[in-house]
Image (cartoon, rainbow, N blue to C red):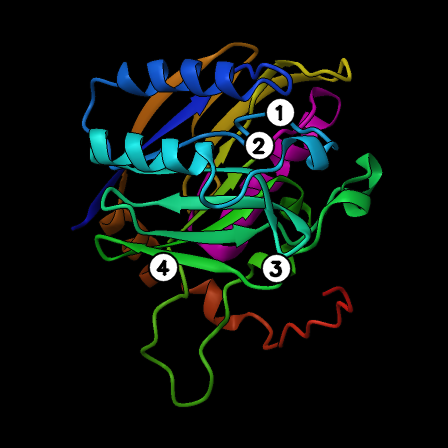
Amino acid sequence: MSTLSITVIQTNLRWEDKAANLQILEKKINSIKEKTEIVVLPETFSTGFSMRPGELAETMNGDTVQWMKRIAAGKKIILTGSLIIEENGHYFNRLVWMLPNGEYGVYDKRHRFSYGGEDDQFTAGTKRLVASVKGWKINLLVCYDLRFPVWSRQFPPLSGEAGRPPEYDALIYVANWPDRRVHAWKTLLQARAIENQCYVVGVNRVGNDGNNIHYSGYSMVVDPLGEVLYQKAGEEDIFTITLDKGNLDSIREKLPFWRDADHFRIVNDDKEG
């Protein structure tokens, strides 16, 4: 119960080619020899970060979600990553947290990348997803969310809640984060770990997309003190790491900084449907 094994898959993505991406990713997942419990894929892993949801979106009954169910069941893992989903006439950049038994949770990307036109094509999410695994709590977010610390902030205990633990133990960010801004990616992953006193796992892609934007990866795992436990730049990689809850609890007990954070409420004033 005190450890959690996570595999990150840093991969090139075939532009808007769902069949090719799923075939490649299935081979990569099946190649994992180490014991693992969670496998993390990049943002929009089946298509790349395309702004053509009208042509590429699927429903939750579509091929990619069914593929995730099959892979998670066959490998007995939790499989997560985001894809383009259509629901009730809206398009979402939706992270799916697929369990081996076919049950799943979803998180719709809250912060749409307006610089790339994502806000014109996709609807923003309104709710966080904090998943539970083996006594761990994991907050699941997508790419541009990384720039907005309030959305991921641990809530400190209120009066009378002195013994309450933090809301979550790890943050997972799935991303298509370009190389030209990779310094921000690396810095903010460490910042989110330090300020929330949690592990952070950031999974990015490599290669060039259909808009000739280059991605250098730098997928990372960061410990609660901000120390980098893993990072890989410039090439595809599959890496499994085991996180230690005992280490996390010890750091929080010795340095309980998270308890002194400001109290606040997130008020959703988004007028979109």
Q: Which is closer to the viewer, label 3 or label 4?
A: 3
Q: Residue at x 55, y 45 (%)?
A: 94
Q: Are marks 1 and 2 in contact (CB under 8 Å)?
A: yes
SS state under label 3: helix
Q: Is residue 163 above or below residue 2?
A: below
Q: Which residues are magenta?
A: 176-201
Name the outermost residue toward the bottom: 160
Residue beneath label 2, please? 44
Q: Is residue 53 above or below residue 111?
A: above
Residue beneath label 3, please? 151
Residue beneath label 1, please? 48
Q: Position of residue 22 (x, y in %)?
A: 44, 21
Residue 196 horizontal side relative to residue 182, left or right: left
Q: CA distance from mark 1 to mark 2?
A: 5 Å
Q: Which is closer to the viewer, label 4 or label 2?
A: 2
Q: Position of residue 101 (x, y in %)?
A: 23, 46
Q: Magenta region's main secondary structure?
A: helix
Q: Which is closer to the viewer, label 3 or label 2?
A: 2
Q: Locate residue 271: give its quadrant.
A: bottom right
Q: Position of residue 240 (x, y in %)?
A: 31, 25
Residue beneath label 4, please? 252
